[in-house]
Amino acid sequence: MNESPPLGIPPEDWAVTPVSVRVALLALLPLLPLVAENQRLQEQVTHLQARVADLEARLNQHSSNSSKPPSSDPPGAPPRRATRTRGRQPGGQPDHVGASRDPAPDDQITATILLRPERCPDCGLDLAACPLDPAAPIHHHVWDLPVIRPTVTDFQRHRITCPGCATPVRADLPPEVPRGAFGPGVAAAIALLHTDYRLSLREIPRLLGQFFHLPISVGATTQLYHAVGAAAAAPYAAVEAVVRQRDANIDETSWPQGTLPLWLWTMVTAVATLFRIGRRSRATLTAMVGPDFGGIITSDRLRVYA
């Protein structure tokens, strides 16, 4: 056989190779690409099997074998086991220690009304001129909300005509005075009611009007809310920079904004906590932790964390 030696075998080695070995080697050479392709396919099958097992495990999760709520159970989920009742009626149990409101301290009392009996209920004697008993009276404290009305400050910007050049000069507002009709207290209340108490920007003007007698429109409420967001940009960026340098626990919960199905993301570290509203996506996670985050994330194995 005068075939050229395969690539990598010197001619002198090939010349002393037995003919039977040459024939077998030349027959195997066309199979080498198939061996490499077979190895690649086996690795792909192993990866896909692991992925299928993970997806099946997720599909089989329900409220009985995971922390998912019963409202998320699919139609084929097994029925939840009935909780064992303890035979107790709801509410306070017999012989339980009761709780009562502590009396207000003296410095918090805003009004005191002295009450004295006027007539004896047994004999009908008039008690108006009788002295009070030395025993301490029984205190009955009533807590109530006062009628709250906003403060209105009238900044009167007077004008003076300059005697030197006859130019009319109008007084400027001080730097700390808002250029709009509402002060920082109103803006802070709007931000708190919309975020912590989840009132809509349309409900907030009604509450401010009914409880605080503050006339304000939906448009002005929206402008003040966005102004608070802009003012908080710098401290938010500072917190963002701190949490991105540490290991973090991250979770997300449904937080719809109107018709948008958004999520509230929470990034908790040992020194600070960061919140962010966005979609349940990898892009939102990257925007929260930054593209160069090198810490350890503890999460609930949502796909975006992989």
Image (cartoon, rainbow, N blue to C red):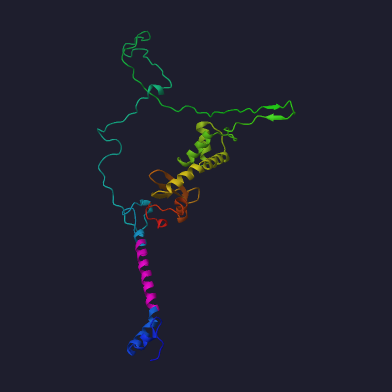
119 w.r.t. 50: above or below = above
Residue at 35% over, 87% down: 22
Q: Residue furthest bottom?
A: 1
Q: Nearer the viewer, residue 220 or 93?
A: 220
Across and down, in percent, residue 99 comes to: 31, 30
Across and down, in percent, residue 32 comes to: 38, 79
Find residue 37 and report its image quarter. bottom left
202 w.r.t. 111: above or below = below
Residue at 48% over, 45% down: 237
Q: Nearer the viewer, residue 162 or 152?
A: 162
Across and down, in percent, residue 45 comes to: 36, 69
Q: Which residues are magenta?
A: 33-54
Q: Residue furthest right?
A: 165
8 w.r.t. 144: above or below = below
Find residue 162 and report its image quarter. top right
Count of picture labels: 0
Q: Residue furthest front?
A: 12
Quadrant for the N terminus in the image: bottom left
Find residue 54 and report its image quarter. bottom left
Residue at 44% over, 46% down: 242
Q: Is residue 209 magenta?
A: no
- Please, what is the dominant secondary structure of the magenta stretch? helix
Residue at 47% over, 44% down: 238
Position of 206 with respect to 4 (left or right) is right
Position of 229 with respect to 19 (left or right) is right
Quadrant for the C terminus in the image: bottom left
Across and down, in percent, residue 80 comes to: 31, 52
Q: Residue furthest top?
A: 129
